[in-house]
Image: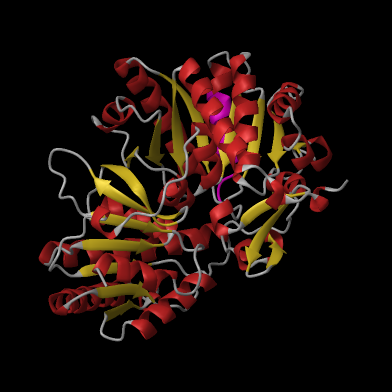
Amino acid sequence: MTETALDETALDETATTSTAARVRALRAARGRVLVVFDDDPTGSQSVHGVPIVTTWHGPELDWALAQSAGAVFVLTNTRSLQPDAAAARVREIAAAVEASAARVGVATDLLLRGDSTLRGHHPLEADVLDGIARAAGHPYDAVVIAPAYLEAGRVTRDDVHLVRRGDGETPVGETDYARDATFGFRSSNLRDWVEERTGGAVRAADVAAIPLVALRADDGAARVRDLVLGVAGGGTIVLNALTRADLDTAAEGILLTQAEGRRVLVRSGPSFVAALLGLEPRDPLAPAELGASPGRAGLVVVGSHVELTTRQLARLRERRPGLGQVELDVLELAIARETAEAEIRRATDELVAALGRGDAVVSTSRARRDGADPAASLAFAAAVSEALVRVVRDASAARRPGWVIAKGGITSSDIATDALGITRAEVLGQLFPGMVSVWAERGPEASGLPYVVFAGNVGDDDALADAVERLAGD
């Protein structure tokens, strides 16, 4: 039987729940904290009640590791960095986690949370962590690639990663995500993608796979364990998944493997993190749980330039014509320093005035400007993000909003850390099922500002307008 012939609707949800319970029991027996290196803030979309830190200096990591959640998200934001800087940051954070874990008295496992549409620094980040492990005398036996993000329609079948849109499925290599100026790729088959991303250092034929037929067997977890045990020397394994039950079984199998002393490094989309924690899905947050400050204007910050975000922004403007609108012209930023400074001042003044009248949105212009090569494109994106941060930071200092929605992964990271100064937070839950996380700032001087992390590539065309209506109390 082919993978495509399997009936994903015939799975027993009760069995899924019991599998998650076994995962929790296995994690409790190991007694280790899962530290998630999140390359942008959107990786928390499938979890709740989990601490997040945006810095690895000072007491934040100690605070997070001392919580009882069993997991910690560390916002690395490496997707916004050039390769050398990204590698250096991963090394720095790994050392900080090791030192903090020793102070707190806990053991840790590391996980790389990457993009469900395959953008980001792979294999670089995995290679860095494996190099650290090898130098310490305990190298990884296997690296598992698990990009499925079920709630957003990112699934893997027959080793091919797919994007579900409406009633159809499109191989990810045929989507606009694959044309990303910095992290573009061609392959939809994950085995081929690994070969492509490693420049042929790892051949597709040498990449193992966990198929759906193994996951859905009566002894699925044992089969996963045996498949992973059969890989050694840091070999790569790709994970197929169409449902949460698939991910739960894979999680149990990997934990069984780790219980036998094998070292497994996982690079995953958001959904597999929840499965590895045995975390049950929860309902979207109710309006009373959001913590928005009544009577204070809200702010929407849009930096993502993917096609879906552009449609969502247009629909937001259509549905809320009274919303204050400020646009930062990215082409003006590219002309000269004086021109860029004038554009930043103009946008800041307009945003302060708009917040004085009510809810407002500040967005980058929709014109796309790619550099001559991936490095140049990433550098320009960083300059645009820095300008957007300055606008939001200065406008928020003059007129603090009652809530903030940040649209786009890098945008969400930079606005949280550099514009609003958030260093520690807790994921309260999501606005929609498995999508769009709401953070609550934690710490002795926390303002309680609800901060909504809205990935650029999730939701339907109305999702951004729906989110604004939820926060605005409509």
Q: Give residue 462's quadrant in the image.
A: bottom left
Across and down, in percent, residue 396 comes to 17, 63
Apparent side of residue 208 relative to residue 265 in the rendered image (left or right): right
The relative height of residue 214 versus residue 293 in the rendered view (above or below) is: above
Q: Residue at x 41, y 76 (%)?
A: 313
Q: Which sits in the foreground, 262 or 420? A: 262
Q: Is residue 333 visible?
A: no
Q: Residue at x 73, y 55 (%)?
A: 188
Q: Give residue 362's quadrant in the image.
A: bottom left
Apparent side of residue 197 relative to residue 336 in the rendered image (left or right): right
Q: Is residue 68 visible?
A: yes
Number of labelled discs? Answer: 0
Residue 53 covered by magenta stretch: no
Residue 121 covered by magenta stretch: yes
Q: Give residue 187's quadrant in the image.
A: bottom right
Majority secondary structure of magenta residues = helix
Across and down, in percent, residue 121 comes to 56, 46
Across and down, in percent, residue 267 comes to 58, 39
Q: How is the image coloured?
A: secondary structure
Q: Which sits in the foreground, 361 or 257? A: 257
The relative height of residue 39 versus residue 320 in the rendered view (above or below) is: above
Q: Quadrant of the C terminus?
A: bottom left
The relative height of residue 318 versus residue 154 in the rendered view (above or below) is: below
Q: Residue at x 88, y 46 (%)?
A: 1
Considering every residue shown, the one lying at the far right of the view is: 1
Q: Which residue range is magenta in the image?
A: 119-132
Across and down, in percent, residue 179 comes to 63, 65
